[in-house]
Image: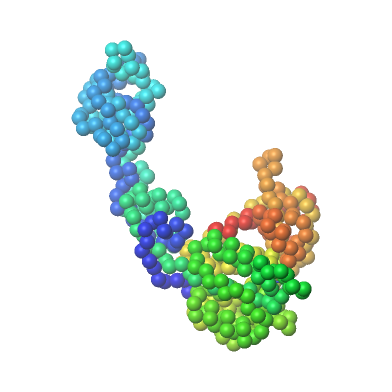
Amino acid sequence: MPVVACERLPIRECLDRVNNEAVKSPHSVPPLPNSAMDGFAVSLSSLAADGITELEEIGTAYAGQPFDGECGQGQCVRIMTGALIPQGTDAVVMQEQAEIAENGRVCIGGGHQVGENIRQAGEDVQQGDIVLDAGVRLSPADLGVLASLGIGQLQVKRKPVVAYFSTGDELMPVGEPLEPGKIYDSNRYSLHGMLSRLSVDMIDMGVIRDDLDSMREALSKAASQADLIISTGGVSVGEADFIKPALDDLGSTEFWKIAIKPGRPLTFGQIGASIFLGLPGNPVAVMVTFSQFVMPAIEVLSGASIRRPALFRARALDALRKKPGRTEFQRGIASLDENGQWQVGKTGKQGSGILTSMSRANCFIVLADDNTGVEPGDEVDIQFFDWSR
Ligand code: AMP
Ligand code: MG
């Protein structure tokens, strides 16, 4: 099911893309020993164990401009951070620990060690090390690591194509005056926002009317272009809910109705080679099911290794109503208390149509199916919103 096709891209274009093959380092980083400090390169054997030693300064090593002589006994080389360690030296004394005498000689005290302030060759990466596994989604640091190895291009998986549409005869586009009995289509905007944070190609198919033929037409068009199809609305059991019959006509339903709140009518199926996730219509349920189902599905499709969202324990500030039977994703505002522990309050009304409860929140309060309610002071699990995970 994951995408197979790959493309070779300049590394700047690989941010957030999925690496196709493990990358081995062609050489060590750093390639040669160099200085971690501005100071003086010396041979430790030139320094008295205690007391001050006076040394002759015989030149300077700059980053990118090595000192090409040899440093002998009783001598030192002035050295800058990043400069190669000169021949005949085995330590760098930082300049704050040296003094220049009036006669120009460099005075250094005791207590220094071999290797001091030297970055050893291969300290970061050894030649032949695996620096990036296959299936890794590339972070800014990964781009830097690749560049540090001189790797300018990388083979990554192609982005999955995601087609999405809203359903509902009550929906109006923003920008037009609202007609009686209608509402604005908000789901396509939150979907656009959430999908934009992910590394996918998007096809916005607009609003589809509540009739079987329109749904069938939209689904088959989407299936011809996309790896993943997302719809919102029309998955309940109302008389205007046509997603499921259209899906069963064109493909198959793999599951329908899950024990979560909000989001119960979520529908998962297949149409040809495409997978289909029919999200509920209620705007909060769209975002909950996106975070819990669409995002992992996109990880699988992308060929990336799945990362489970992290849960944190937090102290509830409010009482939370909850009936047993379904896992609930209530909306919370988490913050650190004066002891550095997480605490979480709710964002007011928790109805699945109350989208402002999402925009005010920074996390879900995840309550297990058997939970029967929360009192202030109880510990709960929270999951921070991370739309780019
Ligand atoms: P449905 O499952 O289609 O009956 O939708 C459930 C609820 O969500 C109804 O109140 C719809 O009006 C509302 N809804 C459906 N789609 C959208 C949308 N795109 N934007 C805002 N609300 C919607
Ligand atoms: Mg509807």
- Residue plotted at (52% across, 69% down): 202
Q: Name the foreground residue: 321 vs 207.
A: 207
Q: Quadrant of residue 351?
A: bottom right
The residue lying furthest to the left in this view is 69
- Residue plotted at (53% across, 81% down): 221
The residue lying furthest to the top in this view is 102
Q: Quadrant of residue 157?
A: bottom left
In the image, residue 87 sits, relative to residue 183, either above or below, namely above
Coordinates of residue 36 in the picture (x, y in percent): 37, 34
Coordinates of residue 128 in the picture (x, y in percent): 31, 53
Q: Name the foreground residue: 24 vs 271.
A: 271
Which quarter holds ligand 1?
A: bottom right
- Residue plotted at (38% across, 56% down): 11
Decide if residue 283 is on the left or right side of residue 162: right
Q: Quadrant of residue 4?
A: bottom left
Asked whether residue 275 is in view, the answer is yes
Asked whether residue 286 is in view, the answer is no
Specify how the rendered protein is coloured: rainbow
Coordinates of residue 245 in the picture (x, y in percent): 64, 85
Coordinates of residue 144 in the picture (x, y in percent): 40, 49
Decide if residue 120 is on the left or right side of residue 200: left
Q: In the rendered image, which quarter contains the C terminus?
A: bottom right
All told, the count of numbered labels is 0
